């Protein structure tokens, strides 16, 4: 049985995650730092919101002479936090992920439980992505049909033709994507 020390696990999980997240932000270098006001402006949130996230343990800016200084790690975390919020995650959900990536969860049983929960989230996100793709395609088709109808000068039949065209497109979608219904 291989037993990891806390410091080894912290390094493995934390460094790997931060490397992965930082790769998506090539314009951020290790020298970048921001005051709380500058950082808040970057993310279009208030300094009060940043202090709230800090109180919740989601971010942990450095301090210089008592002043918060935000660096690339907080930038990466804040980008992830706001993305997760846009997708409907609660701050507790986000904290659960950050507890793992920051190396605060080192117990193997707890890590296994978190991993199981994260896998369920991945399945849910995959279903949601599929639903979004389908809805995006349907709405794009509807807009295409509407564009055609808006160019049609015969106003008497326009509404009926639009409804019939959408009904046909929707029926085709149902028959081609039936495997996703109920998943």
Image: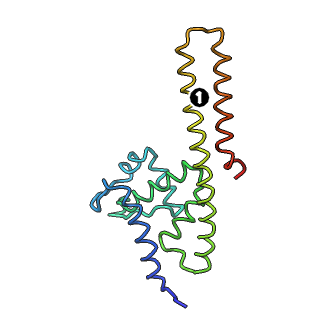
Residue at figure coordinates x 55%, y 63% from the top left: 95
x then y, percent, for residue 135: 60, 39
The picture quadrant where one finds residue 115 is bottom right
Q: How many marks?
A: 1
**Residue 50 vertical placement versus 162 (above, below):** below
**40 or 110, which lies in front?**
110
- Colour mapping used in the image: rainbow
Residue at figure coordinates x 46%, y 46% from the top left: 45
**Residue 44 vertical placement versus 141 (above, below):** below
**156 or 59, which lies in front?**
156
In the shown orientation, is residue 163 left or right of residue 78?
A: right
x then y, percent, for residue 182: 72, 50
Residue at figure coordinates x 48%, y 74% from the top left: 103
x then y, percent, for residue 9: 47, 79
Neighbor class of circle 1 (other Cα within 10 Å; few <14, some 14-19, many 20+) is some
In the shown orientation, is residue 73 left or right of residue 96?
A: left
Quadrant of the image containing the N terminus: bottom right
Residue furthest toward the left?
31
Q: In the rendered image, is residue 137 in sight?
A: yes
**21 or 7, which lies in front?**
21
Secondary structure state at the residue bearing disc 1: helix
Residue furthest toward the right?
182
x then y, percent, for residue 123: 62, 59
**Residue 156 vertical placement versus 46 (above, below):** above
The picture quadrant where one finds residue 61 is bottom left
Q: In the rendered image, is residue 67 in sight?
A: no
Q: Which residue position is annotated with label 1?
A: 142
Residue at figure coordinates x 50%, y 61% from the top left: 58
């Amino acid at each position: 049985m291989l037993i990891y020390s806390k410091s080894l696990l912290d390094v493995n999980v934390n460094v790997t995650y931060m490397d992965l997240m930082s790769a998506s932000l090539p314009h951020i270098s290790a020298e970048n730092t921001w005051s709380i006001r500058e950082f808040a402006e970057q993310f279009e949130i208030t300094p009060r919101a940043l202090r709230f996230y800090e109180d919740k343990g989601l971010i942990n800016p450095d301090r210089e002479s008592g002043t918060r200084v935000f660096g690339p790690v907080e930038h990466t975390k804040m980008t992830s936090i706001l993305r997760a919020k846009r997708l409907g995650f609660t701050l507790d959900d986000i904290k659960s992920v950050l507890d793992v990536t920051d190396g605060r969860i080192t117990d193997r049983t707890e890590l296994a439980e978190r991993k199981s929960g994260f896998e369920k989230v991945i399945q849910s996100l995959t279903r949601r992505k599929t639903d979004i793709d389908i809805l995006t395609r349907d709405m794009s088709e509807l807009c295409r049909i509407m564009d055609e109808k808006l160019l049609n000068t015969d106003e008497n039949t326009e509404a009926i033709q639009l409804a019939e065209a959408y009904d046909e497109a929707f029926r085709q979608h149902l028959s081609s994507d039936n495997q996703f219904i109920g998943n």
